Image (tube, rainbow, N blue to C red):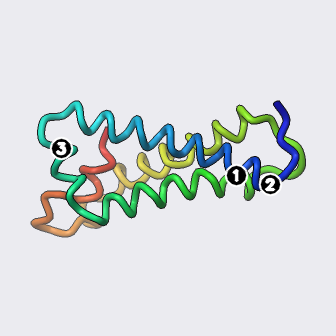
Amino acid sequence: MDLTIWWQQSLVGLGGGLACELLHWYTLSRTPGKSSRFSKKARYWITTIGMIALGGLMPVLYLKGTASAILCFHLGAATPILLQKMVAAAPAVANIQGDADSLREFFAW
């Protein structure tokens, strides 16, 4: 299916970002105690919403004109994964010392 309007592309990109973040939270839930520890703090929910939003923004920034729905979905899903891998690979100096619930640990799959 071809999408010709930017908001349609963005909506499908949001779906891709949502699918990626659902998979991320599912992975966290498979590790004992991880999901309950992260789900109680607002900064992880804000980060999750931000990742989904970036997934919806990427097709608008990347594409021009008509695009396939699968490409928009792929761009939406790939954006959070790329950002998560970049954060996980950041130097340890960037973490706040003594913070057991760091973003690095949250992003580790």
Residue at 26 percent of width and 39 percent of height: 28
Circles 3 and 2 in contact, beta carbons < 8 Å: no
Left or right of 34 on screen, residue 52: right
Residue at 79 percent of width and 50 percent of height: 63
Residue 41: x and y in percent read: 23, 62
Question: Which residue matches tag 1?
Answer: 10
User: SS class of the residue under badge 3?
Assistant: helix
Residue 103: x and y in percent read: 29, 58
The three-letter amino acid code for the residue at tag 1 is Ser
Label 3 packing within 10 angstroms: few (<14), some (14-19), many (20+): some
Residue 47: x and y in percent read: 39, 60
The three-letter amino acid code for the residue at tag 3 is Lys
Which residue is nearer to you in this view: 7 or 103? Answer: 7
Q: Earlier in the sequence, mark 3 or mark 2?
A: 2
From this view, report whether residue 43 is shown above or below residue 20: below
Circles 1 and 2 in contact, beta carbons < 8 Å: yes
Residue at 48 percent of width and 43 percent of height: 81
Instruction: Determine the CA span between mark 1 and mark 3.
Output: 31 Å
Label 1 packing within 10 angstroms: few (<14), some (14-19), many (20+): many
Left or right of 47 on screen, residue 101: left
Quadrant into which the N terminus falls: top right
The three-letter amino acid code for the residue at tag 2 is Trp
User: SS class of the residue under badge 2?
Assistant: helix
Instruction: Determine the CA span between mark 1 and mark 2.
Output: 6 Å
Instruction: Determine the CA span between mark 3 and mark 2.
Output: 37 Å
Question: Which residue matches tag 3?
Answer: 34
User: SS class of the residue under badge 1?
Assistant: helix
What is the residue that sits farthest to the bottom in this orientation?
96
Question: Which residue matches tag 2?
Answer: 6
